[in-house]
Amino acid sequence: MKIQVKDFHAEKICHSGQCFRMEPINDTRLHFSLIAHGKYLEIRQETDGINVSCTEDDWDNIWKDYFDCDTDYGEIYDIVDASDPYLVKAVEFGSGIRILKQELFETIICFIISQQNNINRIRKCVRELCGRYGEERKNERGESYHVFPSPERLAACTEEELRDCNLGYRSKYIVKTSQMIAEGNIRLEQIRSMPYAEAREELMKLSGVGIKVAECICLFALHHVDAFPIDTHIQAVLQQHYPEGFPFSRYQGYAGILQQYAFYFDIYGKRQNSLSPLLFGKNDL
DNA sequence: GGACAGGGTTACG
DNA sequence: CGTAACCCTGTC
């Protein structure tokens, strides 16, 4: 099914570090698979939108919102301070990145895994976790895929079992956090309806969730767009380009999105950076 | 081939 | 409140 949508760059989204179950198909740069909400989706990049492998119903009920398609990301360019060359460049470089609305439990676990870790390895860990503990299903072509495991399933794992997924010391956090959620001590339903500050505070009660991970969960699952996770990259950016402080008040309602663009620019924008398997550019579709 | 770092958090002192 | 320790793998 063909979807007309502006400012949608599948490849950049895939590598932006906010999601870990979207992958290139056959190392292409235009064709991607994604597993979420128990479903398998393929996305093909077109010049004026994307082609998706789902029914119209699923697009309307699931994916449209998942990709935040009701938000006009073109607005971002208009509100960025034209006299801030760093941000102008970052936003230009990251154009087409959207902030996804991912599932809460999955996002919690993925970002616990993300600490002291890099994107490729996070992907590998998550793939392993899903392969072992996620329910198996078949896509339209009869190929099997695994959905993200339930809190109950992960709560039943021992720390040692999870270590086999190369999770290291994070295994303990994942068992504990899954147990807290499965036993109902922390209620995800409630967190979903909380305002940003409250949700962040509640998330930090989970084992292995500190301020940075909580901010990531707020931004990439709960769509609190003022969340502003500060990792080592962003820390360096703030020090280098905003010694007087980042103008948060100017960018209310956009801080998280700008953070994501800055993060992406910092990782891939410098060409000599070996992390970058590809050279992205503005006209690089 | 060993050392180091990779989107931090916890548990100490 | 600052800082070591946590685990593993890809990279140089």
Image (spheres, coloured by chain):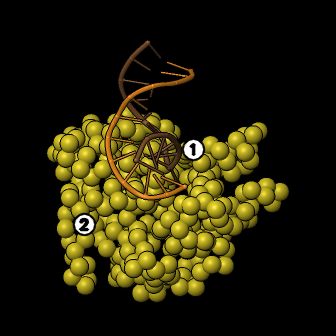
Chain colours: A yellow, B brown, C orange
Q: Mark 1 lies on which chain?
A: A
In this rendering, the label closer to the viewer, 1 or 2:
1
A224 w.r.t. A13: above or below: above
Which residue type does callout 1 highlight?
A: Thr
The residue depicted at 57 percent of the width and 44 percent of the height is: A232
Q: How many marks?
A: 2
Screen quadrant of the C terminus of chain A: bottom right
Q: How crowded is mark 1: few (under 14 residues within 10 Å), some or many (20 or more)?
A: few
Point out the residue furthest to the left here. Answer: A156
The percent coordinates of residue A106 (x first, y second) are: 34, 54
The residue closer to the viewer here, A25 or A153, is A25
- Does label 1 or label 2 sit earlier along the sequence? 2
B6 w.r.t. A282: above or below: above
Residue annotated with mark 2: A146
User: Can you see residue A279?
Assistant: yes
Q: Quadrant of residue A271?
A: bottom right
Which residue type does callout 2 highlight?
A: His
Residue annotated with mark 1: A232
| Labels 1 and 2 within one chain | yes
The percent coordinates of residue A127 (x first, y second) are: 31, 61
Disc 2 element: strand
Q: How crowded is mark 2: few (under 14 residues within 10 Å), some or many (20 or more)?
A: many
